[in-house]
Image (cartoon, rainbow, N blue to C red):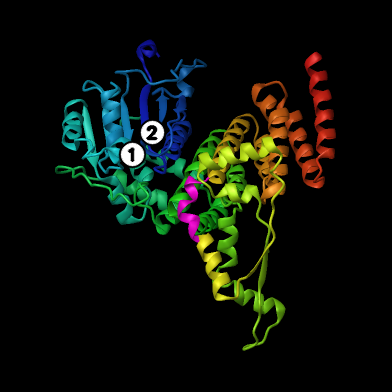
Amino acid sequence: MSGLDDTRPTTLQVSAIGGEGGGVLATWVVAAAQRAGYPVQSTSIPGVAQRTGATVYYIEVFPVSIADLAGKRPVMALYPGVGDIDIMLASEFAEAGRAIFNGFVTPDRTYLIASTHRVYAIGERSDMADGRYDVERLFDAARERTKHAYLADLRQVAEANGVSLNAILFGVLAGIGQLPMAVADYKGAIEDSGIAVGTNIEGFEIGLNFSFSGEPEITDPIIEKNGLGPTTPEALKFRVSSEFPESCQTILLEGVSRLAGYQDIAYAAVYLDRLSGILGIENSVGGDGTVTAEAGRQLALRMSYEDVIRVAQLKSAGDRLDRIREEVGAKDGEPIVVVDYLKPGIDELCSVLPAGLGRSLISLAERQGWRDRFNCGLYLKSTTVTGYLRLRLLAGLRRWRRGTFRYSEEQISIEAWLEDVKGTLSLSRSLATETVECARLIKGYGETHRRGTENFKLIREQVIAPALSGAISTDIATDAVANARAAALSDPDGTRLDDVLAEISKVTIGNAAE
């Protein structure tokens, strides 16, 4: 205890891009320190989508056990300091370069662990010529600016062995011996997480025993036409099994399958990116994945919203006619005629227009009172060649869906809802669950969709937002959201919801006055 005043925490920074499991890795580090009985503190600084910025996780581990501190507690920092990082982990090589450039990696103290594979950043992809970073300069900087650099294409090692990259990085971290925990503590952290334990222990062992001999090679990523990097159905399935708890996996696999069919594989990858952020917060508050699982269910439904493209896609599906024949009891050889009744209006028209044009037309229709007019009834025989081809033509607009007005509006609404879920999850898992369930209000299209969206906005503005700001206690807000949602679902006209929100307002005003 005599030298305690001079003892400082061991500082660790993790920089990870979306899908690399940085949040899970940080959680494992914290859990390992806690199992070993050391004071530990962790914070995260979120980046933005894809390769415009990584999420940074900062961890401090005090190398004296709590039992030996005799009731004292160390004061730890919440943010990494320039020149004050002992261990730097980067899940992708350019992220190591960012850390070096920003001064977080220094030759007198920093041990760098980095996978040398590349995932090209937005600036590299959009450059008119060859905008790729000079990786040789990155290698030179890594050698010169670190106390020791552990560099290898660990993603390739992970893929070759069918394990996750973050488990291998965790094993390398344990192997360099710069943190006070024992190997058993690291393994125990993986086991306690309950996330693909067998596979992650295998990855940990690979990292623990990995030999960083020879000159590491850089692996160029394959840029697919969608610009989001190499994504396959198998990769997404592996990501679900390695990154998410078993309790989430059935729902998330179904969500991935649904969204890949609805749009494409890249869209399904965005689905997992969004849920990864929720899981990270749920892990930090001691959750078991229940909120993430239900969020996954509702998010899959919201991301596969019903527009005219989706309707045409379902009505022209290859197995639809077989299902109809079975339902009506048609015998083999008996002809059947299917007539689909459609009633498109201004909303349906605008939903597939370019975002700017659709937004302008909707605004004009609102001002002129046209929005509920001009619905025209169409009878389409989908069992005829011409009728089927019309449906396929509409379904083929899927490739341009990302540029449409409806897509733009839905993504904005989804992101706002997810931020509410994350915010309420930090306060209360019960409140977060009720917030997740509010997504059930938004469904269908036309008048049904508009009414549900308006009810959702009312609950968000009058209950969820006040709860996030602290104006309403979490217990009151949880009951209020549940009651308001039930009222909105049971009364299409919205009268019951207005009454419930009025009662909630009286209660909250009364509490504020007290």
Which image quadrant: the N terminus? top left
Which numbered disc covers residue 54? 2
- Residue 504: x and y in percent read 81, 28
Using a 10 Å C-alpha cutoff, classify the residue at mark 2 as few (fewer than 14 neighbours), some (14 to 19) or many (20 or more): many
Q: Which quadrant of the structure image shows residue 216?
A: top left
Q: Amino acid at mark 2?
A: Ala
Q: Amino acid at mark 1?
A: Ser
- Residue 351: x and y in percent read 58, 48
Q: Which residues are magenta?
A: 396-404
Q: Residue furthest bottom?
A: 333
User: Quick check: is 403 in the magenta stretch?
Assistant: yes
Q: Earlier in the sequence, mark 2 or mark 1?
A: 2
Using a 10 Å C-alpha cutoff, classify the residue at mark 1 as few (fewer than 14 neighbours), some (14 to 19) or many (20 or more): many
Q: Which quadrant of the structure image shows residue 320?
A: bottom right
Read off the residue under disc 1: 91
Using the numbered discs, state the Cα–Cα distance from disc 2 to disc 1 in whole angstroms.
10 Å
Q: Are marks 2 and 1 in contact (CB under 8 Å)?
A: yes
Residue drawn at (57%, 52%) of the image: 304
Q: Which quadrant of the structure image shows residue 471?
A: top right
User: Quick check: is 8 in the magenta stretch?
Assistant: no
Residue drawn at (71%, 39%) of the image: 369
